[in-house]
Image (cartoon, grey):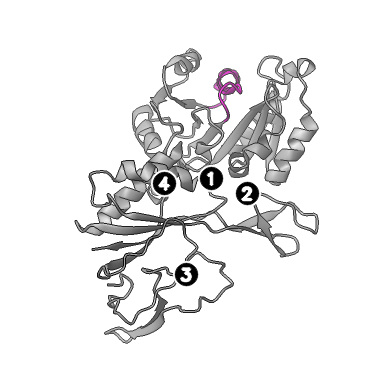
Amino acid sequence: MCVTCGCSDGAQTTYTPVGLDRGETPAAASTHTHRLADGTLVTHTHAPVHPAAAPAQGHHHRPGQPQGTHLSLEQNLLAKNDLIAAQNRGWLRGRRITALNLVSSPGAGKTTLLVKTIQDLQGEFPIAVIEGDQETTQDAERIAATGCPTLQVNTGTGCHLEAAMIERGLEQLNPPPQSLLLIENVGNLVCPALFDLGEGAKVAMLSVTEGEDKPMKYPHLFRASQVMVLTKLDLLPYVRFDVDRCCSYARQVNPDLIIFQVSAVSGVGLEAWYDWLRAQR
Amino acid sequence: MHELGITQTIVAIAVDHAGGARVRRIALEIGQLSAVMPEAIRFCFDVCAQGTVVEGATLEILEPSGLGQCRQCGQRLALSQPFGVCPCGSTQVDIIQGQELNLKEMEID
């Protein structure tokens, strides 16, 4: 039975593969029209139960087997996460809290920059931190040493934070109204790109000790971010890293990316980063 | 390895809609620019489906190719990565196809 209008998939129905080039008109599309009880006309095409012409991999014919019931779902696989993220966004907006989702590979200097940022800015406005790591509370302890309210979320084998973790984190941490909430994601340049947490912006961090072509190699994350912070600039004299080339790669992946170049150790570039943080509130 | 979590979601959605009936077939749409690997989904599927009404179901995965549209000149271009350069020189390319991540349909007994 069709879940759109309740019509039955009879033997006369032909089934058409979906997901082909949008421009093509499938030869045997089973487009038909129904009139519902209230007079509404519904014209629709049944998606395939029997994708004879489908290029899909791994599909098997089962001759002689009776036709099953076909359910058209069209459900986004990230819908549940996105819904919770939207709830988080509302929760944060109601309290005028600005949340940033900080993403990078392990060792890019997220925690060091966070500690420095908190030390320099917490006199101006309240800051709270949700710290995501697979194991240990070491990063949270480093941050909590600044006096800032901090919650460690250990994901175990999970390689990224999800919106539901932030939902629970917000309940426990209860960051004060009008604060800046910094969410340090698990060090990973792939998975966090897919999972909205309800943040105002994703901030990708990349250190000059990594490859300058990382934005090209991990485009999903740099595409999903609004900001890139290039860290450890004090190490530039010791490493082969072309800053201009890196920025040009990053802008090719994401032309709207805002880029900051900083060193939490020497202090270079921090004022521009801080100004941007202030402007987000 | 976000594919494991996504495969668990696929099985959960299917079980939810099956109403206790055995699931014969599940059709997914995983765009080629979606950052999700179909092979990894296949790898996880049998394990995640075990002991549920989804166990033994055929998994079909349709993989729409990447398509972008230039914000400057409107031209459409094929994308093999989630970014690209339009022949007009612009890098302002919106992705209009290839990021799909859907459970499109399924067939139950």
Side of A144 relative to A73 (left or right): right
Q: CA distance from mark 4 to mark 2?
A: 23 Å
Confirm whether residue A89 shows in the render: no
Q: Position of residue A201 (x, y in %)?
A: 56, 40
On whether disc 2 and disc 3 are found on a single subunit, the reply is no
Measuring 45% from the left and 31% from the top, which residue is drawn there? A159
Q: Which residue is mark 2?
A: B82
Q: How crowded is the residue under tag 1: few (<14 C-alpha within 10 Å), some, or many (20+)? A: many
Q: Which residue is mark 3?
A: A53
Measuring 49% from the left and 14% from the top, which residue is drawn there? A142
Quarter of image, res A150: top left
Q: CA distance from mark 2 to mark 3?
A: 29 Å
Specify start and end residues of the magenta stretch as a single range.
Answer: A104-125
Q: CA distance from mark 2 to mark 1?
A: 9 Å
Q: Amino acid at mark 1?
A: Ala
On residue B35, which mark appears? 1
**Circles 2 and 1: CB distance less than 8 Å?**
yes
User: A143 or A161, which lies in front?
Assistant: A161
Q: Nearer the viewer, mark 2 or mark 3?
A: 3
**Circles 4 and 2: CB distance less than 8 Å?**
no
User: B63 or A165, which lies in front?
Assistant: B63
Q: Amino acid at mark 2?
A: Pro
